[in-house]
Amino acid sequence: MVAVTTTPDAQLVPRAVSGEDQAFTELLRRHTPGLYRYCAGLLGDVNEAEDVVQEASVKAYRSLERSDPRRFRAWFFTIARNLCYDALRRRKTWAPLSGGEEDERRPPLSSVDREALHEALQVLSPKQRTLVHYRYTLGLRTREIAEELGLTPSNVRVSLHRAIRRLREVMS
Amino acid sequence: MSHPDEELLFAHALDPEDVPLPQETRDHLGSCAACRQRLEALRAEQAALEAALPADLPLPPGLLARVTAAISEESPRARPPAPRPVADQPRRSHPMRWLSVAAALLIAAGCTYWFTTRPPAESGPPVAEAPDGEETAEEEPEALASPGDSPVADPAPEIAGGPAPVLDHRNAPTPAEPMPPATGAPPPLSPALPGERLDATVLRLEATGREAGRGRRAAVPVAEVEGRPVGTFDGEALTGEAYDRIEDNPFLSPLDQPLSTFSSDVDRASYANVRRFIESGQLPPPDAVRIEELLNYFPYQQAGPSPEAEHPVAIGVETASCPWQEGHRLVRISLKGKEMELDQRPGSNLVFLIDVSGSMNRANKLPLLKKAMHLLSNKLEERDQVAIVVYAGAAGLVLEPTPGTDKEALHAALDGLAAGGSTNGGQGIELAYRVAQEHFIEGGINRVILCTDGDFNVGNTSQGGLSRLIEEKAQSGVFLTLLGFGGGNLNDALLETLSNKGNGNYAYIDSFKEAAKVFSNELLGTLWTIAKDVKLQVEFNPARVGAYRLIGYENRILAAQDFNDDTKDAGDMGVGHTVCALYQIAPPGVELPVAGAEVDPLRYQARPSVDPANPELLTVKMRYKHPEDSTSQLLQVPLVDGGAHFDEASTDFVFSAAVAAFGMLLRDSEHRGSATFATVIELAGDGLRFDPDGSRAGFLSLAHQAKSLAEAAEPRD
């Protein structure tokens, strides 16, 4: 009897590269739900997010050989993130970055209206938005975010703090 | 000392473990109320942000399948068996195919999340950029989103009268659902969101939909109705879905009840529905899981009778050890309908009864149905005719019965359909039947096809009256097919009951793929009934069987005497249909709590004597009628247990055992024995040796997801 157990990504990737489509399907099954949430958050549009997920999956499939099997997830998300940025760039509606004049003493947000937040997120830079979505939409820990984006944890915290101060400004 | 800076407090609120506060800061907090409040506010902010961002946004149904399809289109397995050197030349893509898949994707993207509130202003969504001439659409050329497809606000769900519903606690929110914010305030949903129902507590009390004619169910009090708020952000969630309660069949002793009788069932709706739940990140409510519909979803290797065979249905019986209960045996009984060439099919008289109430106005409902109808229209021929009846506020005939070749009239009628208004299904169904009967095709396929999301309001007709109407019409040869669309207020219980009454089928359409399968193949092909009132009766030999249990088919149990009673209705089988049933058998002498054993022994009767020499384990009997006949034919197959081990069993046997175990786990059945999702995965992997349509691989993937969901849910218990 063939036992099928949970195989780490690091083993699935080489199997997928060697032609085992089942292995690639399994990778997709694992990562597309999170990827979709992430893209939907970043783009603010579920239809576009579906497209990006699909395009990213096809791209990942085509160039799987070039990925580091141990960092498949980060690589896959990077492909999608770049596609999201492309889409956002085409849209050209995001607001200019904050001038850095934030009021340190603006109080933390006490309650957050979904729609208002969604609008406020459009004001953040793509990088800031990525951080917000990694953290709150995907629920990743700071260490995980840092690893995926190639930053240090304290770097992530500082940037996230800046992003949220910006949100406070916009939302209050 | 001075106040700690916000950066530090923020970092601590974000990651309390990774960024502990230094001693001096803690000392300061002890004496500075303002800083304490600041830290508290920062923590609350974290919670508010988490609550406001939809961590539970589920993957749209079918997206994964579409992505997989796009990839298999991408390269029909051109990848060489060995790792390639670093590929500087990307694999040639097939933009044409890619577009058609993207187009299909758009149709099914029927979600109105808060995201779509993005103002349309010059945002020029690249999604609709597929240039016209480019679709080599194997799927559907008109797939690009049109303004007409955009969802509009649903009418607020009405709250039916009657006693307050009691939510079953098993249906408490799964971890995939968002927790309310720490403040205890309701989640900050904006009332302005289009297409989103906001009242999480509304349950559709279709309790009267429980068919009183089914003895066992009649006893279920209204308060037990298990409508539940399902999901949270699948774009149409926060409403109630209604499922009938299912009690597992118990173990029975062949000394008390030597006969087990049930009606065939070829429906598969439950599988698509279970898949929708799991793919959106939650385990289905136990009552949404009908194991027989899971079993019958998959193709099996067993061959059907040859076209010339005397009987249109063949019986297969197999036994091996039970993988989840040491010492027990598992018996698999399967029926297979014969395959026929589609060009031999009789003419079809199809009356579509389409729900155009407000709730159907989502891309995955009415617009999806319209696309699917276009697919169907391509398959229609001269001898076929199609009519369309719609119902909402009032019922109306929008397309007179029209020959299958007049595609223009059909398309025009379809394009004119728009959703809006409330539902009065009662009038609609009467009109649909009347139209079907007036244009009856002798010897043909005469069907009313009800397409709804289950928001089925019978108006002035009583629920019982509706069931009787459907039953009566089935006698006259007009059968009923129910197609459930979307989710959120799916009235699974009512749809299943009605389809059982109308010699009907019930399918759940969760994606364009499923729609295409049903509309382009099944409506004309497999709905071609080859045997009607198919009943099964199994007689167990008490010398070989201590106790037996039928897995699934709870809603299909018949009284023993109904088997030979040709006036008693049962399920039908179409071309190529499979019916698969499993019995778990405990050998004599095994201690088991057997239903009915608590009765005292009889004083005036002796137990029937048992022939210890007969080697047979059981005999399977099947009765069916030819579609035109009113007298049934009988087929019998005895089974002698050769003692096969599970490892020696057929692929069909192993795979169906996996599906049954999966169903029992989802139902949280007390009879699941040692089965776990890991067992299911192992068995299903073995069953993959036969997988002509990829559905078994899909099952394996679903089992993996269910396993993760179950593991995630565990610590909460």
Image (cartoon, helix red, strand yellow):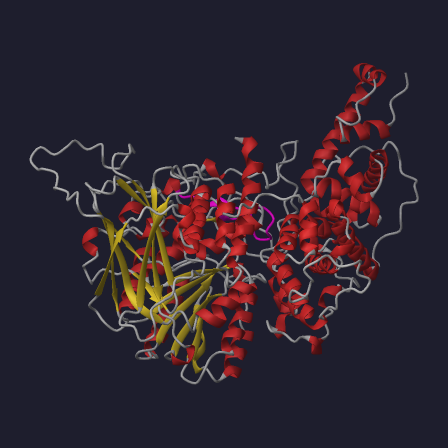
Which image quarter is the N terminus of chain B in?
top right
Give the left or right position of residue B490, taking residue B3 as reference: left
Vertical placement of residue B585 versus B126, above or below: above
Is residue A147 visible in the rendered structure shown here?
yes
Give the left or right position of residue B658, taking residue B612 as reference: right
Q: Position of residue B439 (x, y in %)?
A: 35, 79
Between B164 and B172, the one nearer to me in the picture: B172
Question: Which span is picked out in magenta?
Answer: B225-240
Between B36 and B599, the one nearer to me in the picture: B599
Vertical placement of residue B716 versus A93, above or below: above
Q: Position of residue B367 (x, y in %)?
A: 57, 67
Give the left or right position of residue B514, taking residue A73 as reference: left
* Residue at the (70%, 34%) spot, across then down: B47
Q: Position of residue B600 (x, y in %)?
A: 16, 31
* Residue at the (18%, 59%) spot, across then down: B564
* Main secondary-structure element of the magenta-colored stretch: loop
Residue B236 on the magenta span? yes
Residue B337 on the magenta span? no
Vertical placement of residue B425 versus B558, above or below: below
* Residue at the (77%, 35%) spot, across then down: A143
